[in-house]
Amino acid sequence: MGRKNSKKQKTKQKPRHKSSGARVLKGKLDITRSGVGYVDIEGIDTDILIRPADFNTALHGDIVRVAIKEMKARGKRMQGIVKEVVTRQRTEFIGHIKIFNNKKAAHQAKPLILFKPDVDKPMPDIFIPQENLLEAEDGDRVVVRLLHWDKNDKSPTGEVTAILDAGNTNDAAMKEIILEAGFPLFFSDDALEVAARIPDAISKKDIEERKDIRPVFTITIDPADAKDFDDAISFRQLKNGQYEIGIHIADVSHYVMPGTPLDEEAYQRATSVYLPDRVIPMLPEHISNFLCSLRPKEDKLTFSAIFQISAKGDIKQYWLGKTIIHSDHRFTYEEVQEIIEKKEGLFAEEILILNELAQKFRKKRFAQGAINFSSQEVRFQLDEDGNPTGIMVKESKAAHQLIEEYMLLANKTVAENISKIKINKKPIPFPYRVHEEPDEEKLMPFVAFARKFGHSFDTSSPQTIADSFNRLLKDVAGKPEQHVLEQLGIRTMSKAVYTAENLGHFGLGFQYYCHFTSPIRRYPDVMVHRILFDVLNNHIHADKKLENKCKHTSERERAAMEAERAANKYKQVQYMKNFLGEDFEGVISGVSSFGFWVETIAHKCEGLVSVTSLLEYDEFRHLEADFCLVGKRSGKKFKMGDTVWIKVVAANLTKRQLDYEWVVGDEIGIANGKRKSK
């Protein structure tokens, strides 16, 4: 695959030629499969070519400092030399151990032990000292951590951190996905040592410095399999008839101090990663599942937003600050949903009032321009080895919306509060969560596509765009094209990111928004807690590196999402291998020049129907504007949203790829999404 000579226009900076002193620039190294590297530099509109001999121990994905070589002719691509590796994109790899001369007599030289990484980008073998072998044997598949690579050494040195079970391909696949995304499997010894030294007991001083909410009724509501409870809600009715509702968030910043190895590792990870069969946490388990988890019947330190709210759902006043709480009960979403539906059960009165107010907030939010994208989630039922045995589609219900609305309220309130703070008449740097308005170039094809399903769009203002989206989403609910239109609509939107420049949140309809409510699993929330605490204590200062931190955490969030998608795709392929040769009904979820994707209705598993498999029927051409393929002779159309029948013909776990074939002929009936036999 070739490289682009130019990228989106940026503020140009002319690199100095050698005669005026080589300029050192920072960027990310991308190594192609051929072995040549390219570095993207912020401020320069072309990337810099790096020859393999000039990598200077840098690996694919590393952040590096590059010196520009002398440019011999105008128009030639700039070339550079890596002068320093600033940050390793990854330090752990999966591969095989190779032991040379390991059968020699004991008095002869020690065997040479090398680790050969399973990566698709060129990188050297890693030397493993015998004391770092962890009892691995020749040919074993292992995880190795790169320890150091001196410039004078031909090879890096590493240590085996885990020996993989040859019979458990699922475990190895999940670990490989995590490592490919740049997330380490294990915490460093330094980070674990810092975590272990944190005292479990809450001191008298800690209690005295906080608002004591322990006497107030407090609950947590989380998924049944959750272990880290980072938010709780307190409730009581005041003498004036109003409700006092507190949103209490685990006070991670009390335990994770800036500048420590623990904090540095949390920042580098920036997020927890949630795969179908495991969680790769941002913080060690002692912190995420014990110290900071708001477990029932335990005193816990929290950072809180406490509101006085009228019965009509109007916010009368709020307070922000540090607290200590004591959760009375841990609910699952399913338990709360049952109480809401039956209007009876443990603490039903409190939960029903909380739900009633949450629905008022929700209704008001949509009236003010928020978009009501449904949060349909596909979950796998797994056996003890992590193999999928079934698929569940979880939809957002009132219990989920209850928690969502109070978290949104806290996040919005904190952002609004901080937005008023100024330093030298300028807003204080703060990690806002922003979501820009849709780009017209992306929006118009979607509007045209939606029109084919009978849905009109008013694009005259952001408010009318949001109203049009909500009207469409309401109209398609329960129809076969629902998922396709929702997914295409989401792709039309800009991606939400963290930035110090407040641009508002279009999707939520908020002028100010941030992430405050999940510091156990998101580093930006930790940053928000620290800034808010400083502001509340009048220790206001500007973090000049905040925008870079926002870019890093946004990039890590995207990497985590890609890892989660890859893992879900692997599980889909694993599951559909059980149905090779069988027919299913599905909806066309994407179209390209080389085929169309179909998502099965029964399992929500997506596979590709290649145009080559259609040649027997007709030759098809791609109409990009219409999101469809059209047969040149027959006029047969395959367009997004169409319902079709497919046969599962291949399931490739290595490529995480499903191949389907279109089933020609009349539908003979449906039984659980499968074609009935004649």
Image: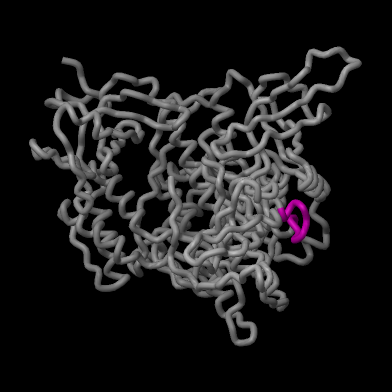
What's the residue at 61%, 19% (across, down)?
166
Nearer to me, 24 or 317: 24
What's the residue at 36%, 34% (across, down)?
605
Question: Would residue 267 appear left or right of 471 to someone viewing this image?
Answer: right
Above or below residue 16? Residue 565 is above
**Residue 78 at what x, y percent from top left?**
55, 61
Q: Residue farthest to the bottom?
A: 425
Q: Residue farthest to the left?
A: 634
**Residue 609 at what x, y percent from top left?**
27, 33
What's the residue at 64%, 59% (across, down)?
66
Question: Would residue 110 appear left or right of 19 to someone viewing this image?
Answer: right
Query: How did the renderer colour the structure?
Result: one colour
Specify whether residue 336 is in view.
Answer: yes
Question: Can you say which quadrant of the picture contains the N terminus?
Answer: top left
**Magenta stretch in the rendered image:** 255-264
Above or below residue 6? Residue 477 is above
**Residue 240 at what x, y percent from top left?**
53, 72
**Residue 372 at what x, y percent from top left?**
34, 57
Above or below residue 428? Residue 526 is above
Nearer to me, 525 or 155: 155
Write down the quadrant of residue 529 in the picture: bottom right
Specify whether residue 294 is in view.
Answer: no
Question: Would residue 596 appear left or right of 631 to someone viewing this image?
Answer: right
Write down the quadrant of residue 278 in the picture: top right
What's the residue at 55%, 47% (across, down)?
36
Q: Is residue 98 magenta?
A: no
Nearer to me, 592 or 469: 592
Question: Would residue 530 appear left or right of 415 to someone viewing this image?
Answer: right
Nearer to me, 672 or 10: 10
